[in-house]
Amino acid sequence: MSIGVCSSRSGLGALLLVTLELFAASIFGREVWQQDSSAKEAKASGGGERRLVTQEDAIRMTRIAGHGSINEYAGTLTHDFAYFSPDGKRFAVVLKRGNLEANTNEYSLVLFETEGVFDKPEPITLATMASSSNREGIKDVAWLADSETILFLGEQPGETTQLYLLNSATGTRRKLTNHPTNLIAFSSDDQGRAIAYAVERPRAPVVNERSRREAVVVNDEAMADLLSGSIGDDERDLMVLDTKSGSSRTLPLGTEIHGKLWGDLTDFFMSPDGKYVAVRANLTEVSPKWRQYKEPLLRKMLQRDLPPGALSWIFRYALIETETGRGKVLLDSPVSDYGSEIAWLPDGRSAVLTGVSLPIEESQSDAKLLGTPGVVEVNLLDLHHTLVASEDLRFLHWDRKTSVLAFEVRRRDPKPSERRHFKRLGFG
């Protein structure tokens, strides 16, 4: 159960990064060229004149809707805006533009063949959806292991966000959920047979039978909620869908987890075989011993005195069995606020966690372990864990043919990141 290590500065994925940058540049470059060409043709024909760019032009402009870009300033692209199929032969990109006439944001999921993207890119539009809310029309694109089936969250005007399945070869699309509230996030097994998803809780009316008798008591409710007549609950419910039967059931976060799924930034990860869901829980109870950790931001969070049961915004991984709903702590240590990922290993018995500390009993005598999150492998059957690397690394991808896990150093500054490659011994 050991892991060997090697490292390099460029490493695997450097060409991929260049590909994405050139792809983005080509789209915007082509749009500018078309505008200039149209202007020249109009001038040559004697019709139309040049004009200043307007706000309407900016709204109608087609942009790449990268992963998480809706939460970034001005929709800044992230490094994850292209979704590559597991075999690497194709990738999907989400585009968006404003429709002033319909008062909607239009989203399109387009498909490219990787081999021809430099010579003659010919995108195929797989799906187009529009959103009349502040939510995205298409988001969280995920390929299944067959490199043909795509899952995504989407919505149409006046609808809630639901889960969709799309066949990239035939273009057929199927709605998998019809939940009364919005889906926030999802995670699927390799085959799409079991899918975990988080949903909003129903909003509670401000005026009810009790408030009619006793009046409305206002505490910390948002003014917008009071004016709208209903109050939202930011705690999320976790559910699992059996796509074969079409039935869904709740996966409770039991008291043994001491945490909740909260808000729109929920993180959970379905194992490839669908037997487990790893949840990054927002803790409502934190061990006083954790105050020995020295990571700067985490240390500030740990020094606060909170009332019992309050959200700490300190996170820990828990593991839930999808069949029984039983939960347990996956690794009894905090997750870094700078980022964390999970890499499920193909044996289905272990997972690699990044951005986590070792349990306090094992790290309290080592200043580096107390101050820097690392990479840890955890056996799911007995929860035995092994330190893989004592530095903060971001997981990139897992090559099943070579049994190599690729990482990059997670930086807090704009300097280039170094790459790290770990070979999982015992596979292949």
Image (cartoon, rainbow, N blue to C red):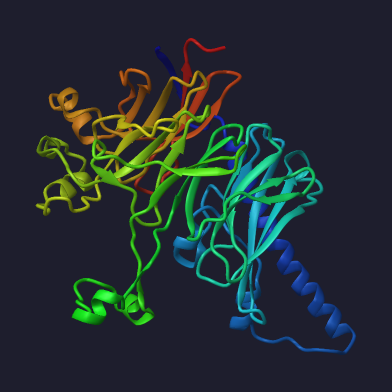
Task: Residue 43: give x, y in percent of width and height.
Answer: 84, 85
| Of 10 and 27, the residue lying toward us | 27
| Of 339 and 13, the residue lying toward us | 339
| Of 168 and 46, the residue lying toward us | 168
Q: Is residue 383 visible?
A: yes
> What residue is shown at x 74% (from left), y 44% (from top)?
168
> What residue is shown at x 38% (from left), y 79% (from top)?
228
| Of 316 and 427, the residue lying toward us | 316
From what the image shows, is residue 216 above or below residue 107?
Answer: below
Corner quadrant of residue 219: bottom left
Q: Is residue 419 visible?
A: no
Task: Residue 172: give x, y in percent of width and height.
Answer: 75, 49
> What residue is shown at x 40% (from left), y 63% (from top)?
202
From what the image shows, is residue 386 above or below residue 269?
Answer: above
Quadrant where the image shows the C terminus: top right
Please identify the residue farthest to the right as the structure is shown: 45
> What residue is shown at x 78% (from left), y 42% (from top)?
169
- Does 50 sit left or right of 132 as displayed? right
